[in-house]
Image (cartoon, rainbow, N blue to C red):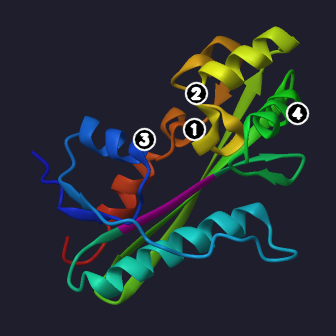
Amino acid sequence: MIDLPRITLASGSPRRVEILESVGWPFERQAADIDECEVAGEAPEDYVVRLAREKALVVAEMRLGEVVLGADTTVVVDGRILGKPTGLDDAKRMLRELSGRSHFVLTGIAVAADGRVETALERTRVDFREMNEDEIEFLAEKGDPLDKAGAYAVQAQAALFISGIDGDYWNVVGLPIGLVYRLIMKKPGV
């Protein structure tokens, strides 16, 4: 029998909350307020790991003695980050860009405990089939795209248009829970 240690989730993401709850992980949530702007010349992989680390450290300073989990997820196409859309027109633009193509979902993970931080990165390829304008309109209008990197949720309406996933499905949802488990369980004292 394993005993999942109580953690503090440094995130406001409802999807991360749902994933932790679905596996029965005991946690509290305290969203981190950090600057999420990209740094010029920063690789997408470095970007998500840096943000995850910053989130974990900000919350760890307030929650001394606790294990704090920070995470950041983004969509990358042609080496460019597609963040959260600024509105429905931007969401449609992103969905057109993803239509008929493969892209990567990257999640940086950081676990802060006892003054130390461990980081990791998960990468998953997602293949979208070609979508026509009516399908893009449907996905933008019904898929609640505005709070999601790349303007879609794999576990909702976007599932109609995804032709393949190579890697961790939970990473695409927003939290690669297997990687989180391995990272947290290797921490000293846990």
Highlighted magenta segment, given as a residue range: 69-73
Mark 1 crowdedness (10 Å alpha carbons): few <14, some 14-19, many ≥20? many
- Distance from disc 2 to disc 1, alpha carbons, whole Å, reads 7 Å
Q: Which mark is residue 154?
A: 2
How many angstroms separate mark 4 from mark 1 (CA)? 17 Å
**Residue at horizontal 44 percent and vertical 52 percent from the top:** 179
Label 2: which secondary element: loop
Residues at marks 4 and 3, CA–CA distance in whole angstroms: 24 Å
Decide: marks 4, 3 in contact (CB < 8 A)? Answer: no
Q: Is residue 20 above or below residue 39?
A: above
Mark found first going from the N terminus, 4 or 2: 4
Question: Element type at marker 4?
Answer: helix
Q: Are marks 2 and 1 in contact (CB under 8 Å)?
A: yes
Q: Mark 2 or mark 1: which comes first in sequence?
A: 2
- Mark 4 nearby-residue class (10 Å; few <14, some 14–19, many ≥20): some
Q: Is residue 66 left or right of residue 46?
A: left
Judge depth for marks 3 and 1 and give the one in front: 3
Task: Give the image location of residue 158, x and y in percent.
Answer: 64, 21
Residue type at numbered disc 3: Arg
Q: Which residue is mark 4?
A: 97
| Residue linked to disc 3 | 15
Assess whether mark 2 and mark 4 are in contact (beta carbons under 8 angstroms).
Answer: no
